[in-house]
Image (cartoon, rainbow, N blue to C red):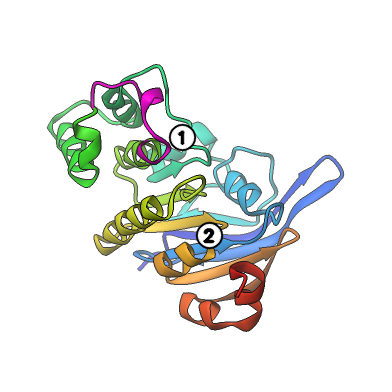
Amino acid sequence: MTDALVVEGLSVHYGGISAVRDVGFTVPTGQVVGLIGANGAGKTSTLKALLGLVPRKVETLRVHGTDMRRIPARDMVRHGIGYVPEGRHVFGGLPVEKNLLLGAYARPWDADTRARLDEVYDLFSVLRGMRHRLAGALSGGQQQMLAVGRALMTKPRLLVLDEPSMGLSPKLIDDILAVLQRLNGEGLSMLLVEQNAKLTFEAATTCLVMENGEVAMTGTSRQMSRDPEVRRVYLGL
C-alpha cells in the first residue's frame, strides 16, 4: 500500500536563520502521525513547507505516490490534502454553511458534494443548528469544528492539522480528539502538529519530537508517553 505522505531532506531557511534542517518522516496510509515540540521547535514551519506555504528545499515529497515538490500551494487540495490551519482562520463575515461550501471550491456542486455537507453536519451536529449564523459569532471551539469541517468538505485522503487544541477548554479538546479518532477509524490518514502532547499521544499512532528544527525522537505514541524525558519536558510529569 502506498504511504499517505513521504518526506525526505526537508529544510527551511528564513534569511540566514535555519528553521528546519533535513527533516524526514512517513505517514502510513490509514494512520495518524503526531509532531510535537515546544514553541519555536520548527513544527509549523515544517507543516507550511510541506504545503508549499513557505520557501523550502526538499529531496522527496510524495502524497499517495504523487511527487508534490513542484505542486503550488493552491493546488494541494486537488491532490487530496485537507488543511486545518493554526488559529482556525474561518471567514467571520460569512455564515457557517458558506464557510463549509468554500471548503469544496475545488469540487463540482453535485449530489456527492451535497452529501458531504450532510456528513460534516452529522459529525458536528452543533454546526447544523448554526448553519446561518456568522462564523465570527461562534465560540472558539465551534470555530475549530468549522475549520475541521471545512477541510473535510474536500474529501481529503490526508488531513493536516496545525494546533487544533489551541485555546480550547479540556472538554472541547476531548471533543476534538473524539472526532479525530472517529475520522481515523474511517480510514483517514492524518498529520497532527500539536503542543498538547497528551492529545497527540491519544490521537496518533506514531509520534515525532522536534527540537531546534530537527526530529530529535521518534517512536510509537505508547513508547513516547512512557519515556521519562518526554514526560518531563513535554508533559511536566
N-terminal of the pair, mark 2 or mark 1, is 1
Q: Where does residue 212 sit, x and y in percent of width and height?
A: 76, 60
Q: Where does residue 156 sit, x and y in percent of width and height?
A: 34, 46
Q: Which residues are magenta?
A: 131-142
> Can you say whether 222 is above or below 124 in the image?
below
- Do labels 2 and 1 touch, CB within 8 Å? no
Who's the residue at 42% across and 59% down the image?
4
> Can you say whether 192 is above or below 166 in the image?
below
Please say whether residue 65 is visible from this viewpoint: no
Q: Disc 2 residue type?
A: Asn
**Residue 98 placement, left or right of 232:** left
**Residue 224 placement, left or right of 17:** left
Who's the residue at 71% across and 52% down the image?
40
Q: Residues within 10 Å of mark 2 (few under 14, many from 20)?
A: some
Q: Which residue is mark 2?
A: 196
Q: Quadrant of residue 43?
A: bottom right
Q: Disc 1 residue type?
A: Asp
- From the image, state whether disc 2 or disc 1 is nearer to you: 2
Q: Residue furthest top?
A: 93
SS category of the residue bearing label 1:
helix
Q: Nearer the viewer, residue 135 or 189?
A: 135
**Residue 204 placement, left or right of 9:** left
Q: CA distance from mark 2 to mark 1?
A: 30 Å
Q: Which residue is mark 1?
A: 75
Q: Quadrant of the C terminus?
A: bottom right
> Can you say whether 232 is above or below 3 in the image?
below
Who's the residue at 54% across and 35% down the image?
72
